[in-house]
Amino acid sequence: MPRLQLKRGLKANLPVSGMLAGEPMVTTDRGTLHVATGAAAKLPIVPAIDDLATLGAVDGAADLLILHDASEAAAQKEKKITFDAFKTALNIPAGASDEKVAAVAGGTSGYLFGTDGTNGVLRMNASMLMSKDAGNGFVTLAVGDVDCGTF
């Protein structure tokens, strides 16, 4: 029975010229498929995400996320971005791994309590006190006098 064998090799050796439109190429070291769109152009084919292995740990500066760029009109819509650059785009401070909040849209995100109750996103004036439990599970607000004014 006849078989079809695709052009194959290392990703570093993918051709950059002399290709035929529609020609498929498989990388044996990366497991990626590329299809030539012209003599000197090729399009990477995006893998099925649910078929990929799970990443054990994240290296924010080196590991990449794949995003679908809805604003792209003509070229491939799938783009790469480092994990750290993605966090920056979401306004999440570098080095942060916990969920944070921002006071307003586009504001710098941070912890409600902060590090000592005075430098978080939520801050108290002199008549109020904010304390957190030892297990970091919740914050308690203590209100001293609330002056509602006069008539």
Image (cartoon, rainbow, N blue to C red):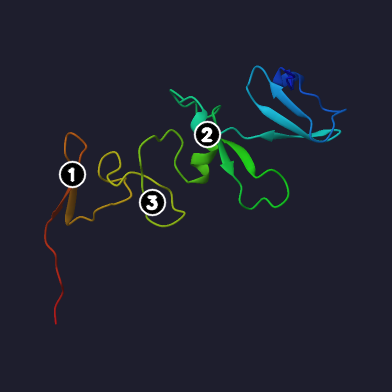
Front residue (pair 70, 116):
70
Q: Is residue 88 above or below residue 49?
A: below
**Element assignment for label 1:** strand
**Element assignment for label 2:** helix
Point out the residue furthest to the left here: 145
**Element assignment for label 3:** loop
Q: How far apart are marks 2 and 1 (CA)?
A: 43 Å
Q: Nearer the viewer, mark 2 or mark 3?
A: 2
Residue type at tag 3: Ala
Work out whether mark 2 precedes mark 1 in sequence or the reverse, and give the earlier one. Answer: 2
Q: Name the residue under label 2.
A: 49
User: Where's residue 5, x and y in %?
Assistant: 74, 20
Q: Where is residue 115, by image quadrant?
A: top left
Front residue (pair 117, 25):
25
User: Where's residue 55, x and y in %?
Assistant: 46, 25
Q: Mark 3 points at which residue?
A: 102
Residue type at tag 1: Ser
Work out whether mark 2 precedes mark 3 in sequence or the reverse, and give the earlier one. Answer: 2
Q: Where is residue 133, by image quadrant?
A: top left
User: Where's residue 84, x and y in %?
Assistant: 51, 35
Relative placement, left or right, of 48 versus 94 is right
Q: Nearer the viewer, mark 3 or mark 1?
A: 3
Front residue (pair 55, 109):
55
